[in-house]
Image: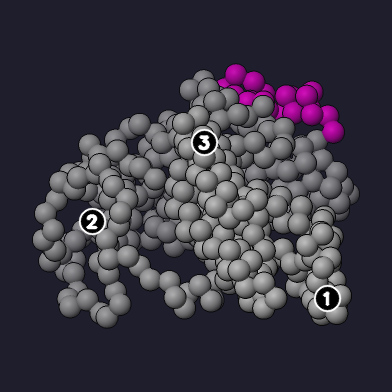
């Protein structure tokens, strides 16, 4: 296909996806000759270089869920490539098998973080994205103004305040309300070079915020509802919750079997419907629920502990439990119990946030936010209490600045 045809067909494919409201992936076929000079045919090399830059310039269509990428393989045995000097082909490692090109295409399709990406395929180096992040950082610049239009209108003036409100822990106590207070603090001026001043508009409430206020921290953002990421991960998913409203939410998220512990006995259901056990357990409740989940774990199963919300609040705060016979139990079935402390994976946050945004834009990720409003810093303690009351359905969010309370958050 001529390069002019590639431009026209890409434009047509984008229009078709937009009109049908069905975003997808477009893969243009370039060549490694578009990445480095081809002295035997400079016109061919220039045209393929144009395909590469054309495709990379379409990266922003990712915002619409449309990803356009380009494959740049070295020499596959075709009539054109067969005319080249065999010595040159040997220098680059020989002809590429078609299977490598197909593998590259499937990678660009399946990796939903790739948009405007150029995948170079060679016998010498395998699959490699070009430019590398290090090379790209050398020339990337930020536009002075964004061309992206927004309907959002800030109700605030641009005047920089002299102070701000913040929550501080003044007494170590498992009761968040008793442990904290709201104080006013001055902003430090002038700003340091290469620093920016940010305003927090919304803040999510975590179940383990009480562990900060009591001097302990074991886990992050876990609620009464436990489930997978609410998109098809290829597993049969079982989730537990308390209450019909939460059960409905889980079903809407695509959970295969919802166990409402207010209506059914979890142990009885698991034993009857999953006699061979459950392969992977995501455990955030702790206490008796941990024991129940461990007993329901299949041979070779994996139990991931990400929290223990049932143990965070009590008359005497969080107390460690003894798990007598735990080692013998997991040894007997070759099982694994692993802790997952979110902050220790901070280096992966950006990578996974990109994937979550992509999934959300494609309609594969559903987000549930509890509708109960909490306005201002002084309402944070109320939000924490509400989360631990078991009444929340979805993420509990505090609007830190009440003047933004009527604005709809948008990704």
> Is 336 placed left or right of 232 in the picture?
right
Residue 313 seen from this side: no
| Cα distance in 3D space between marks 1 and 3 | 43 Å
Q: Position of residue 1 (x, y in %)?
A: 65, 50
Query: In front: 5, or 32?
Result: 5
Residues in magenta? 257-276
In the figure, 127 relative to 238: above or below? below
Residue at (37% x, 37% y) in the render: 386
Q: Secondary structure at mark 3?
A: helix
- Name the disc covering residue 17, or none: 3
Q: Horizontally, is 74 left or right of 86 in the view? A: left
The reply to whether callout 2 and callout 1 are in contact (CB within 8 Å) is no
Q: Are marks 3 and 2 in contact (CB under 8 Å)?
A: no
What residue is shown with label 1? 85
Question: Where is residue 31 drawn, in percent x and y?
Answer: 67, 63
> Which residue is more in the foreground, 144 or 257?
144
Helix, strand or loop for disc 1: loop
Any part of residue 25 in sight: yes
Say which element carries label 2.
Answer: strand
Which circle marks residue 182 in the picture? 2
């Amino acid at each position: 296909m001529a390069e002019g045809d590639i431009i026209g067909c890409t434009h047509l494919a984008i229009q078709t996806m937009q009109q049908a409201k069905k975003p997808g992936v477009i893969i243009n076929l370039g060549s490694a000759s578009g990445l480095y000079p081809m002295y035997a045919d400079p016109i061919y090399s220039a045209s393929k270089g144009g395909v590469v830059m054309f495709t990379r310039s379409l990266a922003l269509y990712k915002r619409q869920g449309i990803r356009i990428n380009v494959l740049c393989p070295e020499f596959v045995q075709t009539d054109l490539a067969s005319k080249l000097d065999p010595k040159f082909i040997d220098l680059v490692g020989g002809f590429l098998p078609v299977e490598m090109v197909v593998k590259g295409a499937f990678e660009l399709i399946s990796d939903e973080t790739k948009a405007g990406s150029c995948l170079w395929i060679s016998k010498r180096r395998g699959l490699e994205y070009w430019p590398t992040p290090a090379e790209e950082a050398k020339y990337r610049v930020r536009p002075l103004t964004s061309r992206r239009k927004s309907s959002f209108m800030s109700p605030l003036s641009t005047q920089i305040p002299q102070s701000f409100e913040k929550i501080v822990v003044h007494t170590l106590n498992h009761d968040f309300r008793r442990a904290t207070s709201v104080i006013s603090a001055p902003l430090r001026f002038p700003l340091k070079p290469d620093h920016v001043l940010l305003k927090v508009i919304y803040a999510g409430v975590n179940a383990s915020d009480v562990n900060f206020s009591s001097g302990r921290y074991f886990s992050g953002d876990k609620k009464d509802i436990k489930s997978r990421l609410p998109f098809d991960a290829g597993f049969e998913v079982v989730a537990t919750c308390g209450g019909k409203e939460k059960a409905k939410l889980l079903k809407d998220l695509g959970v295969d079997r919802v166990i409402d512990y207010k209506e059914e006995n979890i142990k009885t259901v698991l034993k009857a419907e999953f006699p061979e056990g459950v392969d992977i357990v995501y455990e955030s409740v702790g206490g008796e629920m941990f024991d129940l989940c461990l007993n329901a774990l299949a041979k070779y199963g994996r139990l991931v502990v990400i929290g223990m919300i049932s143990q965070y609040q009590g008359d005497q705060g969080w107390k460690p439990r003894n798990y007598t016979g735990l080692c013998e139990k997991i040894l007997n079935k070759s099982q694994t119990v692993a802790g997952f402390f979110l902050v220790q994976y901070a280096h992966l946050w950006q990578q996974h946030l990109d994937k979550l945004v992509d999934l959300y834009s494609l309609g594969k990720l559903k987000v549930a936010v509890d509708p109960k409003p909490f306005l201002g810093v002084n309402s944070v303690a109320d939000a924490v209490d509400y989360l631990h009351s078991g009444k929340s359905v979805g993420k509990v969010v505090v609007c830190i600045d009440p003047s933004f309370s009527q604005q709809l958050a948008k990704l």
